[in-house]
Amino acid sequence: MAKIIVPHANEREKEMFKKLNITLVDSISEQELEKVLIDYLKRHNVLHLATCRDNEPRSTPLEYFNNGLTVYISSEGGGKFANLKANSKVCYSICDPYEPAEDFFGASGLQGWGIASTFKKNDDLKRYEVIHQYSRNRDVLKKYGLEEVASRINFNVITIELIKIRYLDLRKGFRNVMWEREEKRKGEQDKM
């Protein structure tokens, strides 16, 4: 279960958006929003992953694939893994190109917060194969005859389980609509 938060426009904003032929979403079900978010994730393949260690943030553009709202990244290595070992909390962003001169209200993108876990392919080959079935590159590797080469690489796999997502696409009526996993909110309330 997830909580959905749909910000509401004030009267002045409603009037402005109406003049711009923008109708903001007033409410949306969890299932409807999840479908919108999953479709957005499927239409893209690069995210910017933010990790942090010793109070030093790092943002890395990475190719990803997803199964529902769970995001996977295969990587040969890098500083992000030292960061993830020290701090599993991550944030990522994905966006479309934005040309304000053409459409000032045409920005669209999402930001996701979650908990990352990692493993090496050769340490859990069965798990890797289950996850890899969602990869979009399987056909590309085959097309270029790179399957065998890729199979020899002991990839690191990052799995991101989302805690919350903020989604913006004014032209489709979404103005910072939030999806937040219920379990996370309950855990936060227990700490208070």
Image (tube, rainbow, N blue to C red):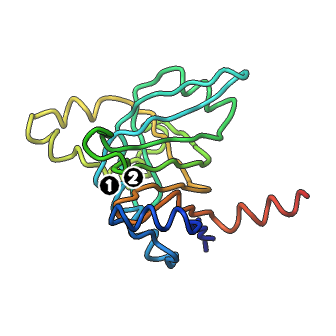
For residue 4, above or below residue 37: below
Residue 94 found in image quarter: top left
**Circle 1 residue:** 134
Residue at 52 percent across and 77 percent down: it is 27
The x and y percentages for residue 86 are 69, 29
Which residue is located at x 45 percent, y 39 percent? 157
Q: Secondary structure at mark 2?
A: helix
Quadrant hosting residue 152? top left
Q: Amino acid at mark 2?
A: Ile
Q: Determine which residue is flagged by label 2.
A: 131
**Pointer 2 local density, CA inside 10 Å: few below 14, some 14–19, many at least 20:** some
Locate the N terminus and report the quarter of the image it occupies.
bottom right
Q: Where's the C terminus, which quadrant?
A: bottom right
Name the residue nearer the viewer: 165 or 184.
165
Q: Is residue 141 left or right of residue 79?
A: left
Q: Position of residue 126 (x, y in %)?
A: 41, 51
